[in-house]
Image: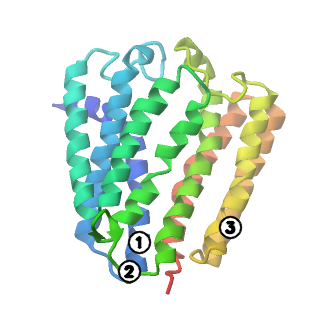
Amino acid sequence: MKTFISDFNKLVKLRLTLTVVFSASISFLMGAKQQGEIMWINWLMLTIGGFLVTGAANGFNEIIEKDIDKLMKRTMDRPLPAERMTTGQALVLSVLMGILGTLVLVKLNFVAGLLSVFSIFLYAFAYTPLKPKSRIAVLVGAIPGALPPLIGYFAAFESLGFGLAYTEVNEYAIVVTPFILFLIQFFWQYPHYWAIAWVADEDYKRAGIRLLPSLEKDKVSAWFIFISSLLMIPVGFLPMYFGFGGWVFTAVALLGGLAFTWYGYKHLVERTDMSAKKVMYISFLYLPLIQLILLFDFIPFK
């Protein structure tokens, strides 16, 4: 049982899945604050549904990449390449998680359920096959990677018909808030994943994967990491500009964007694995921190 639990955690990429669920749950709470009431049972359903859907997407990803994972040090101990779990077993688990998770999210809101299905297919069957073929995979992967805030936000609302929010809340809020949350997470992924791609480049090369902008650990790729880090400064002002982010959030987002830019610049100058790791580490801290602060400094639309 202990081995199965360990392998299950690796199949669903537990840390990544929990990060995604955290992002969705924070957005759910923002949507709930917008309505003036938090339905904690719905929050629990979102957490469970989000975990299952994300776990399913990661399971499909590992099934497709089984042979690739055998070639990389960082992934060769996953249950499929290590042959502790069969493809059939992983497929059954992933399909069950995908169906159950989607059903839970659909019960909360049709749009949330629809987005979850779209996210699974885009991540597992578009991004994953593209990884060994084209660096554009980072762009494609950034879309499902940024959908959790939308799923979480819409899950906070009751639905009517095809998921139209049946609520007295300002329609502007229902459109603008989740879209801005999506954009923040969308732009964040570029310095995050390119920094990871730089650090893991040798490992990726063994599997035939090249995700850096120029395909090499060179000045061009370093410039892309720096520019994408720099973009986090204006992105951090979007919630205040559109009327739902307070001064505390904006100040912290600015400091985070400056830290991103500083480490991005240092990497542009040094172009080492260590400087790329610093960009990666600041990205790990940045996203959950500003999401949490935005929740407490959230200004509901009237």
Separation of marks 3 and 2 at Cα, in angstroms: 24 Å
Q: Which amino acid type corresponds to the residue marked 2 in the rendered image?
A: Gln
Residue at image mark 1: 31
Foreground pick, 99 / 199: 99
Residue at (30, 35) in percent of width and height: 9
| Dot 3 alpha-carbon crowd within 10 angstroms: few under 14, some 14 to 19, many 20 or more | many
Relative vertical location of residue 122 with respect to residue 50 in this rendering, above or below: above
Check disc 2 and report its element: helix, strand or loop. Answer: helix
Q: Which amino acid type corresponds to the residue marked 3 in the rendered image?
A: Phe
Q: Are marks 1 and 2 in contact (CB under 8 Å)?
A: yes
Foreground pick, 78 / 125: 125
Residue at (20, 46) in percent of width and height: 100
Residue at (46, 81) in percent of width and height: 170
Relative vertical location of residue 199 with respect to residue 73 in this rendering, above or below: below
Check disc 3 and report its element: helix, strand or loop. Answer: loop
Q: Residue furthest front?
A: 161
Q: Position of residue 17 (x, y in %)?
A: 38, 44
- Mark drawn on residue 237: 3
Q: Give the mark nearer the N terminus: 3 vs 2.
A: 2
Relative vertical location of residue 239 with respect to residue 140 in this rendering, above or below: below
Residue at image mark 2: 35
Foreground pick, 148 / 160: 160
